Structures are given as structure tokens and as C-alpha cells.
Image (cartoon, rainbow, N blue to C red):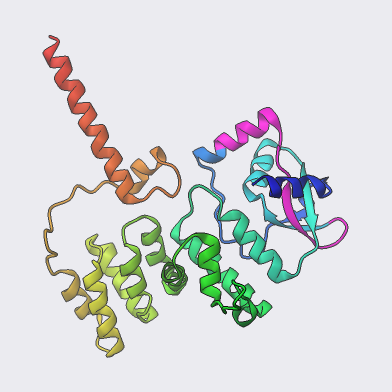
Amino acid sequence: MPEAKDDLKREKVRVVPISNIEDFPDHPFQVKDDESMAQLVESIRMNGVLNPVIALKIDENHYQLISGHRRKHACILLGIDRIPLIGRELSKEEAIIEMVDSNLQREHILPSEKARAYKMKMDAMKQQGKRTDLTSSPLGTKLRTDEIIAQEAGESRNQIQRYIRLNELTPELLEFVDEGKIGMRPAVELSYLQEEEMRDLVDFIDDEEVFPSHAQTIRMKVLSKEGKLDTEAIREIMLEEKPNQKAKVKIPMERIEKYFPTGTSQQQMEDTIVKALALYRQRQKENRDAR
């Protein structure tokens, strides 16, 4: 986006103490000390911070970070105490929208991060009054807030709504979604359960290491609406044999996740492991044939 880069060049860049920059309140995107962070640290060690961070100007010397949380963290790890910054004077709602939009450009984003980010952006846009007063065409067609977010994010309106529903899940269930153990559609169905029912389901999953299918979550949602979803009902639904159910090899996530980029789904990990095993088997055969 050349125009955006030109805009950055025209804005005044200051080098300010990192201690004067607060993280954005309720920032929904995680900053992890993973392989990607190690690469960023090495890049900054070699070249410095090439792109200034963007921050909301609180006063002449204090800021709230909008974009650049990973760069700030990398500098702290390196012992760098000052960073190039562009300070902007924005309303709270404008700052939230810019924070979400700038961070959605990251390569790997977890479902939980999108869920919180889209919710923050929707609330900010509604606060601005954009739910009813924005138009998208010369004909004056009114757009819903979720439609505007969908267009800007390159997602469907239904998908935006699904992500926002994930905010209703308990932290444990949301973590299962991030890990790829529960899919998006089953997770949305579970978001309609009562909190106590969700916790009963988490207890069952922890005990049995079995995760619900979409069909099972639909049944749970129906029983919850009828006030009939107790621990016994959850157990009965979850212990039903799923179609084409097969025995699975279970490997603790902490043993393999270090080999994958942050945000890699469980299915992507499984596919990579299977390909690696196929390559290993081929190499074994080649070694035997060479003897």
C-alpha cells in the first residue's frame, strides 16, 4: 500500500522512551516469545526498528500503543529503551478501530484474537453511530455494522457473527477452539449454553479427552434451551460413537507445538506430521535398498 507508506512518511516521527508508552487497554492480540518473536528480535538487533510504532497521544510525553506491540516487546528483550513513534490524536473509538485494523494484518491470528478484535471494533463503530449512518454506494444503501466489518476484513458477514459469538464461551472452551480441537461451527452452538453447562462439558472433556462434533453441540443447544442439559445428558451425548469414528493416537500439544508457527491449526499439524512420517518411511526403504 504505497499511499499508506507515504502518509507515514509525512507524519512526524519521534524517538521516545518505551517507558512512556502504555499497551492499548484490552489489547486482544497476543505477544508471544515464540520463533517469530525470535526472528523479529534478531532483525531489530541487526537493523533497528525500521517502521515506527503508531500510538494514541495522551499528552506531550505519554502514549497508548495502537500498532507495534511486538516491536515494543522485542526492543524490551534487547534492552533498547527508546523507539521511533508516530503519535496520533484520535478519539477512543477511532483508536480502537485503527488498533484492530492494523493488527489484523498479522500472518497468524487465533480465533480468540479475532473474536475479541471484531467485538471491540463493532462496539466502537456503534458508539460512533456508524450502524445507521454509513452508506456504501451512490444509491445510499445502508450497511449493518457487521457488513462493514466483513467487507473491510475480507470475511463474510456470517463469519464475523460467528467470531463475535465466540466471546460467549468460557476461557477453557475458547482455548480448545484456538488449539483446533473444537471447530468454529460447534463452538458457535456451544456459545448458547449456560456457563455452568459449559463448565460441565469442559469437565467431561478433561476426563475423557473427547471433543464434541457439530451434531452433538446442536443437540446440547436444544436441551439447554429446554432446561434439560445436565451432566448426565452431556455424558450420554458425548459417549455416542460418532460416524466413521476411529481410534486416534494422542500426542500432548506441548510436545509438538514448538515445531509449528503460532496459530497453526491442529489439522495442519496432523497433515505435516503425516507427511514427515511418509518421508521418513521412504528414507528407511531407500536405505534398506542401498544395502
Q: Is 145 situated above or below 104? A: below
Q: Is 219 situated above or below 250? A: below
Image location of residue 110, percent across then percent down:
46, 56
Residue 229 appears in the picture as rendered: no
Horizontally, residue 227 falls left or right of residue 140, namely left
Indicate whether residue 53 is drawn in magenta: yes
Horizontally, residue 33 falls left or right of residue 49, namely left
Question: What residue is rendered at 86% in x and 55% in y?
Answer: 61
Q: Is 250 situated above or below 170? A: above
Horizontally, residue 231 falls left or right of residue 125, namely left
Q: How many marks?
A: 0
Residue 30 appears in the picture as rendered: yes
Question: What residue is rendered at 13% in x and 69% in y?
Answer: 240
Compare residues 30 and 138 and report the one nearer the observer.
Answer: 138
Question: What residue is rendered at 56% in x and 51% in y?
Answer: 105
- Quadrant of the image occupied by residue 194: bottom left
Q: Which residue extends farthest bottom? A: 226
Horizontally, residue 215 falls left or right of residue 19, namely left
Image location of residue 251, percent across then percent down:
27, 46
- Quadrant of the image occupied by residue 59: bottom right
Image location of residue 120, percent across then percent down:
58, 70
| Region in magenta | 38-61
Question: What residue is rendered at 35% in x and 80% in y?
Answer: 193
Compare residues 58 and 139 and report the one nearer the observer.
Answer: 139
Q: Is 58 situated above or below 39? A: below
